[in-house]
Image (cartoon, grey):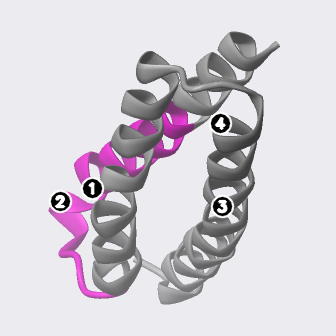
Amino acid sequence: MDPSGRIAFRDMVEARIAEWQKNIATLGQKIAKTRDDPEASEKLEALKGRMPLLEKKAREATEVPDESWPDFKSDADLVLENMGWLQSSILKRLG
């Protein structure tokens, strides 16, 4: 497999990690300012918990064997999708 696609994927995941770090900080501030919402706080912790997995995916992206790449990419995409869902859910709770 052409390594440029994997490098681009890794770069995209790293950019998303930086974006998520900012989003998590902003959501934490909103939760603290608006009200103490245990469910929103729980979802924020779940969001934070996905970060190490996403960081691991970024580190491993260029080293995955060709036969494992589709599953690897699918797993990474699911983590990103789940993080988006958690963020949307938190924002809905906060109004």
Nearer mark to the viewer, of 3 and 4: 4
Distance from disc 2 to disc 1, alpha carbons, whole Å, reads 6 Å
N-terminal-most mark, 2 or 3: 3
Distance from disc 2 to disc 4, alpha carbons, whole Å, reads 39 Å
Could you tell me residue 28's position as x and y percent? Answer: 62, 49
The residue type indicated by label 4 comes to Ile
Is disc 2 surrounded by few (<14), some (14 to 19) or many (20+) residues within 10 Å? few
Q: Which residue is identified by label 4?
A: 31
Nearer mark to the viewer, of 2 and 3: 3
Q: Secondary structure at mark 2?
A: helix
Q: Which residue is identified by label 3?
A: 25
Is disc 1 surrounded by few (<14), some (14 to 19) or many (20+) residues within 10 Å? some
Up/down of 78 relative to 86, above or below: below
For the point 75% across and 40% down, which residue is it?
33
Nearer mark to the viewer, of 2 and 1: 1
For the point 57% across and 75% down, which residue is it?
5
The residue type indicated by label 3 comes to Ala
Up/down of 4 relative to 48, above or below: below
Quadrant housing residue 27: top right
Q: Which mark is residue 68?
A: 2
Residue 79 part of the magenta segment: yes
N-terminal-most mark, 3 or 4: 3
Nearer mark to the viewer, of 4 and 1: 4
Could you tell me residue 24's position as x and y percent? Answer: 61, 55
N-terminal-most mark, 4 or 1: 4
Q: Secondary structure at mark 1?
A: helix
Residue 44 part of the magenta segment: no
Could you tell me residue 9's position as x and y percent? Answer: 56, 71
Q: Which residue is identified by label 1?
A: 72
N-terminal-most mark, 2 or 4: 4
Nearer mark to the viewer, of 2 and 4: 4
Q: What residue span does the magenta drawing correspond to?
A: 62-83
